Image (cartoon, helix red, strand yellow):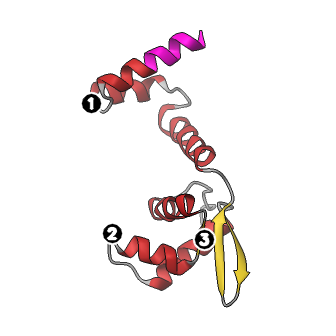
Amino acid sequence: MRPKSPTLTPQELEIMKVVWPLGRATVRDVYEAVRARRPIAYTTVMTMMKIVERKGYLRKRRQGRAYVYRAAQPKNRVIRGMIREFIDRVFNGSAEPLLVQLVGTRRIREKDLERIAEMIRQSK
C-alpha cells in the first residue's frame, strides 16, 4: 500500500474552497454548498472532511451537537504548496516548462502576460 499524500485531491480542494470564504463551516454547510453544484451524499462530505482534517488542512471544534470546521492553513499557502508539488512532480522542479505550456496553449491572457513580465522586471 502506498503512503497517503498530503496533497489535496480535487474533492478535498472543493471542500476547502467552501470553507475558506466562510471562515467556519459545519458538514451541513459544506454539504449544501457542494450539493448545489452536483449530487453528493452527506456522509461522503462528512468522510471527506475527516480526511482533510487528518491531512492537517482543517481543524474542528465541537459546538453543541455539531463540529465546526475552520481552515488550518491560509488558502494562499495551500495553493503555493500544491503548485510547488505539481512543478516538482511534473516538471522536475522547473517552472519554465509550465509557463511554456501555458503560453503555448494560450491559457494565459495578454493582460496576465503583461503583469507577469512586469513582476519579472521588478524582481531583478
Question: In the rendered image, which quarter contains the C terminus?
Answer: top right
Mark 3 or 2: in front is 2
**In the image, what residue type sits under mark 2?**
Arg
Q: Element at badge 1?
A: loop
Q: Quadrant of residue 70?
A: bottom right
Query: CA separation, marks 1 and 3?
Result: 35 Å
Q: Residues within 10 Å of mark 2 (few under 14, many from 20)?
A: few
Helix, strand or loop at label 3? It is: helix
Q: Which residues are magenta?
A: 116-124
Circles 2 and 1: CB atoms closer than 8 Å: no
Circle 3 Cα neighbour tier, 10 Å, few/some/many (<14 / 14–19 / ≥20): some
Coordinates of residue 117 in the picture (x, y in percent):
44, 15
Residue 64: which numbered mark, if any? none
Tag 1 residue:
105
Q: Where is residue 5? Give x, y as percent.
A: 60, 57
Q: Tell me, yes or no, whether the two marked residues, 1 and 3, touch with CB atoms within 8 Å.
A: no
